[in-house]
Every structure is written in structure tokens, then in C-alpha cells.
């Protein structure tokens, strides 16, 4: 019985850590996309200013 409860405890910890890792990947990806979009917008604005 002790083995089973320890095993379940480790499985739950594994699931929690996997969820945190996946969530971190999604958040990091979204932040990078937002930063790239902002940099592209800034670069486009600079190009427009150079043309004037």
C-alpha cells in the first residue's frame, strides 16, 4: 500500500511539472511572437519615415 501511494504521488508531481513546462512553452512562444510583431511594426514605421 505504501508503494502505491508513493507511486501515485510521483505521478501527480510528474503531471504538474509537465503542465508547468507546457504552459511555460506557450507563454514564451506568445511573448516572442508579440515582440517580433512589435519589432516588425517599428521597422516598418522607420522605413516610412525614411521615405518622407
Image: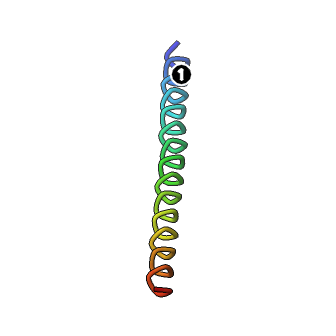
The x and y percentages for residue 45 are 46, 74
22 or 2: nearer the viewer: 22
26 or 49: nearer the viewer: 49
Q: How is the image coloured?
A: rainbow
Q: Is residue 22 left or right of residue 35?
A: right
> From the viewer's perspective, is residue 4 above or below residue 24?
above
Residue at x-position 52% and y-position 36%: 19
Residue at x-position 46% and y-position 64%: 38
> From the viewer's perspective, is residue 13 above or below residue 41?
above
9 or 21: nearer the viewer: 21
> From the viewer's perspective, is residue 51 above or below residue 10?
below
Q: Which residue is mark 1?
A: 8
The x and y percentages for residue 13 are 48, 32
Say few, some or many: other residues with alpha carbon within 10 Å of mark 1 (under 14 / 14 to 19 / 20 or more). few
> From the viewer's perspective, is residue 19 above or below residue 35?
above
Residue occupying the far top of the picture: 1
Residue at x-position 54% and y-position 39%: 18
The x and y percentages for residue 3 are 54, 20
The x and y percentages for residue 34 are 48, 57
22 or 16: nearer the viewer: 22
Q: How many marks?
A: 1
Residue at x-position 47% and y-position 87%: 50
Residue occupying the far front of the picture: 52
Q: What secondary structure is marked by label 1? A: helix
Amino acid at each position: 500500500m505504501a508503494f502505491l501511494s508513493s507511486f501515485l504521488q510521483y505521478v501527480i508531481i510528474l503531471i504538474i511539472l509537465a503542465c508547468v513546462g507546457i504552459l511555460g512553452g506557450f507563454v514564451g512562444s506568445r511573448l516572442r511572437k508579440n515582440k517580433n510583431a512589435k519589432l516588425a511594426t517599428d521597422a516598418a514605421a522607420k522605413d516610412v519615415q525614411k521615405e518622407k
